[in-house]
Amino acid sequence: MKMQFEHISVLTQEVVDFAPESTQTILDCTLGGGGHSRCLLENFPDAKLYGIDRDALAVKAAAERLKTYEKQTKLGQASFSELPEFFAECGEPVFDYILADLGLSSEQLARAERGFSFLREGPLDMRMDPDRQQITAAHLVNNSSEQELLKILRNFGEERFARKIVGKILEFRGKTPLKTTKELAQLVSSVIPRRLQKQGFNPATLTFQALRIAVNDELQELEVLLKQIPSLLKTDGRVALISFHSLEDRIV
């Protein structure tokens, strides 16, 4: 198993350009390997940066990537809802700039054993923090009721074929548990009419998105972060939130 964390940060120049000119304190809420943080510190070399991520591997990789700046960085493993505990340990400043790059990292998708990708064979896991989170995607698909699964696919995936997909899941798990990403991806593809499958858009995309959001409580975590921002941001500070789907957009 590879241990290197190889995440490609998006919109790095835009993130730097949007920062206030006199930025002295930065909070990176999604370290993801430290790409954005390093770019910001290269452009604001006197700034103090605080950074968190739910993924322990991301925090470890960020610490290595930001080693040159270790005297001015404070990093930790934490979810958005755990920010108060993080600040209790390292102090709670107010920030000139707060950044959150929402959703998955390219590294999480690339690791088959994490179970995020329908393109790679792996266990149905999808936990961003596998050491501390108990509920996996496999647990949800194999133990949730029909109504619970419908709610997940409709609310978190806006999947128009939710009822057909859930029906197939119930049929499948009645014989044997769903265990792998490929099993689920193939199951979803089998119930969506081929004529309605969009070119360049995997039929399992919305189902995987929905389960991942449910496993990690992503939308609730985002709401918690947004409620904390006013007390963490300086009066003339700025916030950069990078979102990737309409559910995040509506909350932001």
Image (tube, grey):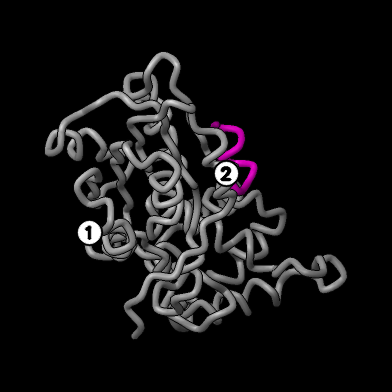
What secondary structure characterizes most of the magenta part? helix
Q: Position of residue 105 (x, y in %)?
A: 48, 61
Q: Quadrant of the N terminus?
A: bottom left
**Relative image position of residue 149 (x, y in whole percent):** 51, 56
Q: Secondary structure at mark 2?
A: loop
Provide the secondary structure element on which disc 1 rests.
loop
State whether residue 149 is above or below residue 174. Answer: above
Q: What amino acid is at disc 1?
A: Arg
Front residue of 200/30: it is 30
Q: Which residue lies at the image location 36% right of the left edge and 60% below the top edge?
A: 128
**Label 2 CA crowd tier, 10 Å (few <14, some 14–19, many 20+):** some
Q: Is residue 246 above or below residue 57?
A: above
Most distant residue in the right direction: 195
Instruction: Give the residues in magenta.
Output: 244-252
Q: Nearer the viewer, residue 28 or 195?
A: 28
Asked if residue 52 lies left or right of residue 42, the reply is left
Q: Which label number is shown at residue 132?
A: 1
- Left or right: 106 in relation to 86: right
In percent of the image, x 25 and y 45: which residue is there? Answer: 73
The spot of residue 202 in percent (x, y) is: 70, 69
Residue labelled with disc 2: 243
The C terminus is located in which quarter? Answer: top right
Residue 206 horizontal side relative to residue 66, left or right: right
Position of residue 146 measured from the top left corner of the image (x, y, whole percent) = 51, 57
What's the CA distance linking mark 2 and mark 1? 25 Å
Specify the quadrant of the image occupied by residue 127.
bottom left
Q: Assess whether residue 246 is covered by the magenta stretch.
A: yes
